[in-house]
Image (tube, grey):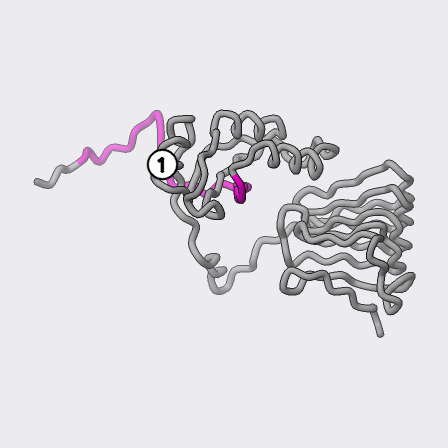
Amino acid sequence: MTVALAGRAPASFEIKSATLPLVALLLKSPDLALLEEELRARFGDLPEFFDSDPMVIDLGPLKGEGDVEFPRLLELLKAYRVNPIAVRGGSEGQMEAAIRSGLAAAPEAAPHPSPVPKGEKEQVPTSALVIDRPLRSGQQVYAKGRDLVVLSMVNPGAEVIADGHIHVYAPLRGKAIAGARGDAQARILSLCLEAELVSIAGVYRTTETELPATVRGKPAQIRLVDDKLVMDPLNP
């Protein structure tokens, strides 16, 4: 039987589809003690990295194995100023446990991103964060959701972090972390590469491995290729 709804639009509400900017946690181990340790190591000194961002917990990497203590997991994540709201990719038992803990079941992500409609431009950040002063040891700058441009020296012990690219138009002697939220297309560029640590999308390299002579102390760029950091001289 077909049911016809009244054609008058409600005055008090309207329902539309919505697309929300979410961060996703790909859980690779049910060991929450290990997760807590690694979260503290990566984000413990970045109180502004998350700003009440909604999060979906992706259980796909677990491949249905292991029991996840969801109440403890949610408490742990909320300590880092994220709001877990949904879960996906788990086994039937994992999903039921997550739903009992108050999470919603999210649909699986599409295998490929939707193409940009013809005639429209892809949305990109409109501006970069520009720092025009030297950064001393112990100082840290984070460009959330955009690129970072530094016009003065990044001294040893200083740290520059960006969700996008990092440009240092001076010696880079501290730590540089680009693609901090997983953007594997991000790059690090410097007019004098002498960094203590460089990282793109979680893949990092420290001074324990000496920089190649072709880029050490020279203009260079760093990019990620097949999960490996590639360093190339600029204007070779």
Amino acid on which the number 1 mark rests in the picture? Gly
Q: Nearer the viewer, residue 100 or 191?
A: 100
Quadrant for the C terminus, please.
Answer: bottom right
Give percent across and percent down for residue 31: 55, 36
User: Number of labelled discs?
Assistant: 1
State the residue position of label 1. Answer: 93
* Disc 1 residue crowd, few under 14, some 14–19, many 20+, Cα 10 Å: some
Say above or below: 2 vs 119.
above
Q: Nearer the viewer, residue 142 or 196?
A: 196
Residue at 47% x, 61% y: name it.
115
Quarter-wise, where is residue 51 in the image? top right
Residue at 76% x, 61% y: name it.
222
Quarter-wise, where is residue 170 in the image? bottom right
Give percent across and percent down for residue 199: 73, 52
Q: Which residues are magenta?
A: 5-29
Quadrant for the N terminus, please.
Answer: top left
Q: Main secondary structure of the magenta part?
A: loop
Give percent across and percent down for residue 161: 75, 45
In the image: residue 5, left or right of residue 222: left
